């Protein structure tokens, strides 16, 4: 397809995401190098010259730092780290790429206006993920979250709690038991339309478990206060991600001593748009431009 359409439409822009796509994307570029521009999202670890551009978070390079080297046995480094520092093929982001931008938030605000606009303010949205190999927790974090949420309820107008597919059943049970009877708190039961985008648009502040790079990246794209619970449980490059967000002033630890009526802000995280700009610039260097198919 790339070869057949090249003279009429120009090169084909191919965006591949995730490690499972690496052999496919690299093979396409090998077979039609003059007809395609291949962008790989997530670091392929080695042989970056198989792609025209690689987009990956800064914390993927944490294993090359002195601290990271100490945490990885030497015989495993070739399998779980990039081999060399980023070069011109690499676009570094702070967090994960996603679809949350100002336009998407405006649309979500309109779609969810009837349900969320009238909620008492400030609206605190709590997003609960699930444990990972590098951020382990269970009922212990649920109890910590329950205690800290109880402490800030008096300064909240309303609270909305959502779980992810990875949230352990025991964590869900504990939070539902603790808050289902509280008139200030609404817990999404997974039925009907997912309110996630509406929550991002209408929330005044967020509390998010530290395990999810994606949830944190999305919330930090709003410019609103983001409080993190469980960051001290993260290890390796995920601890580096948490530290980076704190240094940028985007997140703060959730302690239960916060007054949710007090707000703070920062320049919203804009990784997706900035990465797209880098792709456009790289195409322009070859005399190509991007046009959207009708």
Image: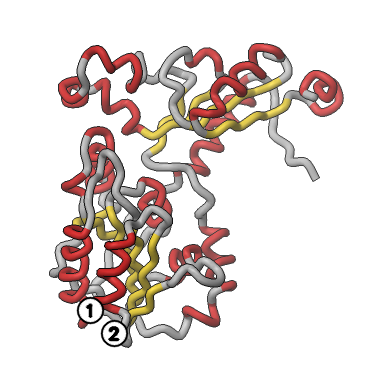
Residue 41, visible in the rendered structure: yes
Look at mark 2 in the image and give the residue it sits on: 182
Q: Give the quadrant of the C terminus.
A: top right
Q: Nearer the viewer, residue 182 or 101?
A: 182
Q: In the shown orientation, is residue 181 left or right of residue 280? A: left
Residue 121 on image: x %, y %:
35, 81
Within 10 Å of the Cα at label 2, are there few (<14), some (14-19), or many (20+) other Cα atoms? few
| Residue position marked by numbered label 1 in the rendering | 153
Q: Is residue 264 above or below residue 216?
A: below
SS label for mark 2: loop
Q: SS of the residue at dot 1?
A: helix
Q: Residue, x 15% and y 68% (percent of image)?
A: 256
- 185 relative to 16, above or below: below
Mark 1: few/some/many CA within 10 Å (<14, 14-19, 20+): some
Q: Is residue 57 above or below residue 32?
A: below
Q: Quadrant of residue 46?
A: top left
């Amino acid at each position: 397809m790339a070869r057949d359409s090249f003279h009429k439409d120009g090169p084909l822009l191919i965006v591949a995401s995730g490690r499972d796509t690496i052999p496919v994307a690299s093979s396409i570029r090998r077979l039609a190098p003059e007809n395609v521009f291949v962008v790989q999202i997530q670091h392929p670890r080695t042989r970056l010259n198989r792609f025209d551009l690689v987009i990956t978070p800064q914390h993927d390079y944490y294993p090359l730092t002195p601290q990271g080297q100490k945490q990885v046995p030497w015989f495993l480094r070739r399998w779980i780290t990039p081999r060399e520092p980023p070069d011109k093929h690499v676009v570094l982001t702070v967090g994960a790429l996603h679809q949350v931008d100002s336009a998407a938030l405006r649309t979500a605000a309109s779609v969810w206006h009837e349900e969320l606009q009238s909620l008492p303010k400030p609206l605190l949205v709590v997003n609960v993920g699930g444990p990972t190999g590098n951020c382990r927790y269970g009922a212990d974090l649920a109890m910590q979250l329950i205690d800290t949420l109880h402490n800030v309820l008096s300064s909240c107008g309303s609270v909305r709690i959502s779980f992810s597919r990875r949230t352990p059943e025991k964590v869900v049970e504990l939070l539902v038991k603790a808050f289902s009877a509280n008139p200030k708190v609404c817990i999404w039961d997974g039925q009907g339309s997912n309110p996630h985008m509406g929550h991002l648009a209408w929330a005044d502040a967020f509390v998010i478990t530290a395990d999810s790079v994606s949830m944190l990246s999305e919330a930090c794209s709003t410019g609103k206060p983001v409080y993190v619970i469980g960051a001290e449980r993260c290890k390796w490059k995920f601890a580096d991600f948490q530290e980076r967000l704190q240094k940028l002033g985007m997140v703060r630890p959730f302690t239960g001593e916060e007054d949710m009526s007090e707000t703070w802000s920062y320049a919203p995280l804009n990784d997706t748009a900035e990465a797209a700009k880098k792709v456009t610039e790289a195409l322009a260097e070859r005399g190509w431009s991007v046009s959207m198919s009708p």
